[in-house]
Image: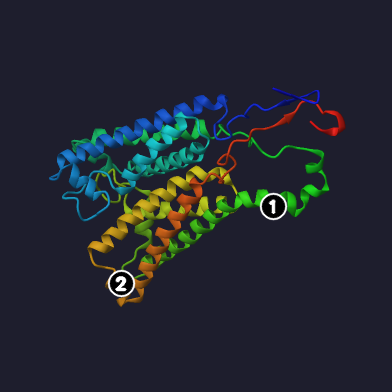
């Protein structure tokens, strides 16, 4: 406390706007434990795949970024590797009760729920169910799928209610609540703070349109089969094998939906989706980097402009690299989101001194 002109001014730091309320600590801890547990299972599968393959750890590390370097097919795919790292990071943020972890955890929960529902659809096929009994790893695969469903339900059920009103907003004063509050001067700072969110939303929506255009183009070719493709995206029994790596149909359709939903929310200025934007942009950036490495080692860059499709593919890849990098930078910035900025010290007047001063 500081005394000034007979009044009392509270100069103690206000609560950290980046931390969730203590009342939500249980939800954040449950999310952290659940995601860390599932990430540990994925790490175990990764280690098992390395041990069963012909290469060593260094070959696997090279294969993380060079799709053609891995000597054998791994049990998990690049999306699972990226989500494993993401789950661990989100678990750490949730354990620290950082509010940015909430939307990232909800995104993870929806992804795991979609994977579980796809597998549940596949289990309705008798021949696919028999694979679990005949495959030596069938029981472990089924246990992993079951754990993913439990983790998804725990994360979604605990984190959805863990919302709170924005803290650290501008104080309510007669001047702020008057007619001038509706003018450009009052809305200017708020509009500026929402700008990074809207930029990220626009970049996501453009990426969604580009990916949707490629998907429609591939499915409308003579060899395209829309029904089979969508069936593969929602039914785990289509491939006829037990595979923990998500097929391209599921990842492509899923990425289009995530880009669309997050893009719309961010474009509307919903800055609380910062964690989800950062998580998915980082995942897409990793996948794009793998694509760039593959194009480099296959000498595609030198032949890309030989056909219009090759040139368009190169432009799309370049945009994805630039856009996802921009989203990661913007979402990591301190000025993004209602709790991404600097802490407010919250000078509050407890008494008004003489002459109207503090």
Return the disc, 1 or 2, that comes first in the chain's sequence.
1
Residue under pointer 2:
304
Measuring 35% from the left and 67% from the top, which residue is drawn there?
314
Measuring 41% from the left and 54% from the top, which residue is drawn there?
253
In the image: residue 170, left or right of residue 200: right
Q: Where is residue 248 in the image (x, y as percent from the top left)?
A: 33, 54
In depth, the one of 122 and 353 nearer the eye is 353
Measuring 39% from the left and 63% from the top, which residue is drawn there?
318
Extreme-front residue of the structure? 5
Q: Where is residue 84 in the image (x, y as percent from the top left)?
A: 34, 40
- In the picture, the quarter occupied by the C terminus is top right
Q: Where is residue 298 in the image (x, y as percent from the top left)?
A: 23, 64
- In the picture, the quarter occupied by the N terminus is top right
Q: Can you see residue 59?
A: yes
Residue under pointer 1:
188
In the image: residue 141, left or right of residue 317: left
Quadrant housing residue 150: top left
Marks 1 and 2 sit apart, C-alpha to C-alpha, by 45 Å
């Amino acid at each position: 406390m500081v005394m000034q002109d007979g009044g009392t001014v509270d100069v103690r730091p206000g609560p950290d706007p980046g931390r969730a309320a203590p009342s939500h600590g249980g939800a954040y801890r449950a999310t952290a434990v659940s995601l860390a547990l599932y990430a540990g299972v994925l790490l175990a599968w990764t280690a098992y795949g390395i041990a069963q393959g012909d290469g060593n750890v260094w070959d696997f590390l090279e294969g993380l970024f060079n799709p053609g370097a891995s000597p054998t097919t791994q049990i998990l795919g690049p999306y699972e590797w990226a989500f494993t790292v993401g789950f661990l990071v989100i678990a750490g943020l949730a354990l620290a009760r950082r509010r940015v972890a909430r939307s990232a955890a909800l995104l993870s929960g929806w992804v795991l729920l979609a994977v579980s529902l796809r597998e549940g659809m596949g289990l309705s096929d008798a021949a696919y169910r028999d694979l679990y009994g005949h495959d030596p790893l069938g029981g472990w695969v089924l246990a992993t799928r079951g754990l993913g469903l439990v983790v998804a339900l725990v994360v979604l059920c605990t984190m959805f209610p863990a919302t709170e009103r924005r803290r650290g907003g501008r104080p309510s004063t007669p001047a702020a609540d008057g007619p001038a509050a509706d003018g450009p001067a009052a809305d200017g700072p708020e509009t500026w703070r929402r700008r990074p969110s809207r930029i990220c939303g626009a970049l996501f929506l453009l990426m969604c349109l580009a990916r949707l255009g490629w998907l429609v183009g591939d499915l409308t070719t003579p060899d395209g089969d829309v029904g089979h493709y969508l069936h593969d995206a929602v039914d785990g029994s289509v491939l006829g094998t037990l595979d923990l790596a998500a097929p391209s149909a599921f990842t492509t359709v899923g990425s289009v939906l995530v880009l669309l939903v997050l893009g719309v929310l961010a474009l509307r200025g919903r800055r609380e989706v910062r964690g989800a934007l950062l998580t998915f942009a980082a995942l897409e950036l990793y996948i794009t980097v793998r694509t760039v490495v593959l194009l480099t080692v296959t000498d595609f860059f030198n032949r890309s402009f030989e056909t219009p499709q090759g040139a368009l593919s190169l432009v799309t890849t370049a945009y994805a690299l630039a856009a996802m990098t921009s989203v990661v930078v913007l979402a990591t910035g301190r000025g993004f989101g209602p709790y991404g900025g600097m802490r407010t010290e919250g000078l509050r007047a407890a008494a008004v001194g003489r002459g109207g001063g503090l």
